[in-house]
Amino acid sequence: MSTDLDPSAARARELTTEPGGLTTDGAGSALPAEQPVEALAPERALATDEVVVLDYGGQYSQLIARRVRECGVFSELLPHHVGADEVRRRAPKGLILSGGPASVYAPGAPALDPALLELGIPVLGICYGMQALVRALGGDVKGAEVGEFGRSRLTLAGDGGRLLGGLPAEQSCWMSHRDTVFAPPPGFTALASSSESPVAALEDVERGLYGIQFHPEVVHTPYGQEILTRWLTDVCGCATDWSPESIAAEQIERIRAQVGDGRVICGLSGGVDSSVAALLVHRAVGDQLTCVFVDHGLMRKNEGEQVISAFRDHFKVPLVAVDAEDRFLARLKGLSEPEAKRKAIGAEFIRVFEEEALALEGAAYLVQGTLYSDVIESGGGTGAATIKSHHNVGGLPEDLEFELVEPLRALFKDEVRAVGAELGLPERLVWRQPFPGPGLAIRIVGGEATKERLDTLRDADAILQDEIRKAGLYRELWQSFCVLPDIRTVGVQGDERTYGYLVAIRAVTSDDAMTADWARLPYDLLEQIASRMINEIREVNRVVLDITSKPPGTIEWE
């Protein structure tokens, strides 16, 4: 059994809900067997070699695909049930079998299709993938009395063979399994062992079949990336010429071919996904694109102006900026429960965006910042589609139909940031921390999101971000923000009694948003932040620090 439990895999999951309701969820979950596969894979560069990763349900499956891309080789993640014909159709240079949570002996456990081993391309089994490979070919896999979870010591056998040769004879690696390979199949050579795994790596060079029990894709396996690179280049013969930047030019050509002389609309939120998608489409079709930016008055300080300045003034993108603050505040009047706020904001956003979309006569295409992680999770299709609430800006009505333009379908979140930087997107937009769709409204906890409270929270957040950036910590934090609870506290300022707001500082570190730890900000920095907030914001007289990790808490308060 392979059990993928490491919480520190590098950003295997990223959850971002952007202003205006655009949601990106890069969950690394297994794909149900009944999902279609035709639309799961993005279009790849025709001159680029590719490796297919079959997902057996492992937590790290997306991370494997991303690590392959970091080696300069394009990768696609497909559900394990696709079959040999589907893999053959994609003409990959290699095939990786991922880890998974099941035992190879469990009823209903994913089985390895033997036809996959007859495609004439190298195969690499990782963890469960290795166990399934060994079992299918007659090796000895058993449930061990003692599992192997976390760091383990890997010892090479002999020279390490083609896959591990030249690496240190003793090295650290990351294990997460209970089933264990005790003997390789006929024709295979055992390459390494660990304390609980008699066979921790093996290969059949003649047939191009390889297996490793440990996880090369996580940072806890120091030589993991080197092993992947060796397999991709020396074994598969892949050219390492793929990069997210290189795909941008090709996507521009594809957008032109799809759109022709049609008019395009984009709901611009200011988040990195919609921003990069908008820039790619503008590079492709110029003024045929019109971006709609709805300022609902719930963004951080000067954020709306930054978006407008970047797109309308710097990039010269046709932009309709809608000042809808009064409309949203009216909808939020009297609401204190977070879900009620979310529903009110979402409903109003739909109305505003629909009004602007209908005013742009002849617009037949809608830009969406769909990422590859979204494609993997949803199995969504391409081409003309009725827009559903999960996939669009704020959840547009079902009768509002556009043909989708999705220039980021091939990219993971980090790759989108790389493309954004290549396109010249300002650093503040490229590396923007996750921000909730309902904006500051749900960071006013337990009370109504009034203009006064929003301005107070906006000012406090601006001070926090300013000081964190000055300290050089912004990109080290997963999120940093302020919360304004609906309480007042007594204070003394200037020899007078005050009754002001309390501001809570929330700063966390995380790799994947599934777990998070409160950030140990320097005391001097915290003192400077608190001093500025109390001195510069008349309505604030107390600052506290949230030191709750996730779990048991969540990152956001509501």
Image (cartoon, rainbow, N blue to C red):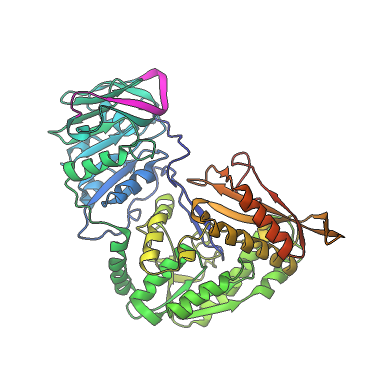
Residue 53 versus residue 511: which sits nearer the camera? 511
Residue 97 versus residue 314: which sits nearer the camera? 314
150 within the magenta span: yes
Residue 274 versus residue 497: which sits nearer the camera? 497
Q: Is residue 365 left or right of residue 397?
A: left
Query: Which residue range is magenta in the image?
Result: 143-160
In the rendered image, is residue 398 in sight? Answer: yes
Please, what is the dominant secondary structure of the magenta stretch? strand
Query: Residue 189 appears at what percent x and percent y?
Result: 18, 25
Query: Residue 232 appears at what percent x and percent y?
Result: 22, 44
Q: Residue at x 46, y 66 (%)?
A: 274
Q: Quadrant of the N terminus?
A: top left
In the rendered image, is residue 1 in sight? Answer: no
Against 329, is 79 above or below? above
Q: Residue at x 38, y 40 (%)?
A: 219
Query: Residue 437 appears at what percent x and percent y?
Result: 58, 61
Against 264, is 179 above or below? above
14 within the magenta span: no
Q: Residue at x 70, y 67 (%)?
A: 455
Query: Residue 163 appears at what percent x and percent y?
Result: 21, 34
Q: Is residue 104 left or right of residue 366?
A: left
The image shows a total of numbered marks equal to 0
Q: Residue at x 18, y 27 (%)?
A: 159
